Image (cartoon, helix red, strand yellow):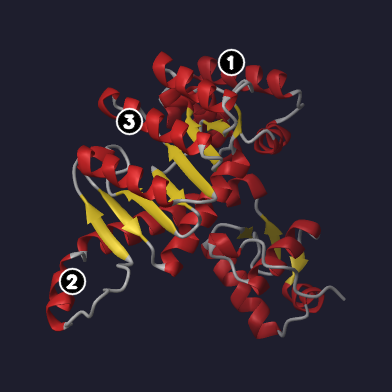
Amino acid sequence: MDTVEGNTLAILGVGASEEAVYRMTLRSPGIALTGIALGCGLDRDDAAAAVERLRELGAVTTDDQRTYHGADPASVVDRLTRTRIRGLQGEIRRVASSRHLVDSLAADRRTGAQAPVTELRYVEGVDQVVACVEELSFLAREERLTAHPGPILAAALDAVRSSDLKCLRRGLRMRTIVHAGALRAPEVERFAAELSDRGARVRRTAGPLERVVIFDRRTALVATDTTDITSGALVVRQPGLLSHLLALFESRWSRACDLADDLPSETEVRVLHTMARVDKDEAGARELGMSLRTYRGHVAALLRRLGTPNRFRAALAARERNWL
C-alpha cells in the first residue's frame, strides 16, 4: 500500500493528501474512489474530500462521477502557479496599503534607546528605491537575489549596475533572473552579460516574473507596481511573507535558463500554453486571435524544435527546458 508522499506541491497550495491523490490518478487513470483511498492510505471521506478539491483546481477529471483521471501535469502546475502568484501579489498590495498602521502603532509606543526593526516599510520614488537598494546591498554579507521582469529604466540602469558590481567586488553571491523582454534592450543585454562575466549567476525567462530583490534571505524589496518600480517599493522583513517570496524566487529560478540558451518567442510561449490546454486547433487559433493556418504552422515548428511527435510530449519537453 502506498503512503502519503512528500508534499512537494505545498508551495502551490496543494496539501499532502491531495498531492498523493493526484499522483495516484496520474499513475492509475480511471481509478475509482475506493482504490484511491486504499492506495493513498486514506479513509473514504478524506479521499472524497481530496478528490473534490482537486476537481475544483482542475487537477482531476471524471466522465462518470465514479472513476477519476489526473489532468496534464504541465497544465496543472501552470494554473496553480498563476493562481498562487495572483494571491501573493494581492497580499503584497494589501500589506503595502496598511503602512498607515505604523504611525498609529508608533504613537502608542514609547520607544527606548533603540526601536525594534520595522518588518514592513514603504519607500516611494525612484531615488528612494535606489538609495534603499544601496543601503541593503551594503549591509548584505552573503547573497543577493534579483529578478528583473521588464524594461530597466535608463535613469535606474546605471545605479543598478553600480550597485551590482560593488556587491560582486565584495564577494557577495549573486543570482539574477532577467525577463527576455528586458533583454531586448541592448544595454540590458550587455549589463546581464557583464554580470555573468564578473561571477554572478544570471538566467533569463520568457515566463511570468516579479520585480524583487532579496538580501541574505532576511530582507526583500518588492515593487508595489510590478510594471513600474519608480512608483514605490515595500521593504519586507516579516518572516512569513519573506518565506513566500523566497519560495517564489526559487521556483522562477528553477524554470529559467542560462543566457546562452535559445528561448522561445512570446508568441511561441503563448502557443505552448494553449497547446497544453486546448485539444482542437480551431479553438487554439481562436483563443490566440490568429488564423488556423498560422496556429498550425507554429505548432508544427514547435514540435520539430522540441523533437516530439505530439502536443502532449511537446508540453512536457517544454517544461523540461524551462520554457513553461
Q: Pointer 2: what residue? A: 101
Q: Nearer the viewer, residue 196 or 149?
A: 196
Q: Could you say where residue 103 lies in the image, as x and y percent from the top left?
A: 14, 70
Q: Pointer 1: what residue? A: 297
Q: Nearer the viewer, residue 201 or 260?
A: 201
Furthest toward the right, the residue is 1
SS for dot 1: helix
- The vertical placement of 73 against 114, above or below, is above
SS for dot 2: helix
**In the rendered structure, which disc, 3 or 1, sits on the residue that comes first in sequence?**
3
Q: CA distance from mark 3 to mark 1?
A: 44 Å
Q: Pointer 3: what residue? A: 159
**In the rendered structure, which disc, 2 or 1, sits on the residue that comes first in sequence?**
2
The amino acid pointed to by label 3 is Ala
Determine the image quadrant of residue 95.
bottom left
Q: Could you say where residue 270 lies in the image, as x and y percent from the top left?
A: 50, 30
SS for dot 3: helix
Q: Could you say where residue 152 lies in the image, as x and y percent from the top left?
A: 34, 28
**In the visual, does 115 lie left or right of 54?**
left
Question: Residue 22 shows which numbered tag?
Answer: none
The amino acid pointed to by label 1 is Gly
User: Is mark 2 in CB contact (under 8 Å) with mark 3?
Assistant: no
**In the visual, does 104 lie left or right of 284?**
left
Q: Nearer the viewer, residue 90 or 130?
A: 130
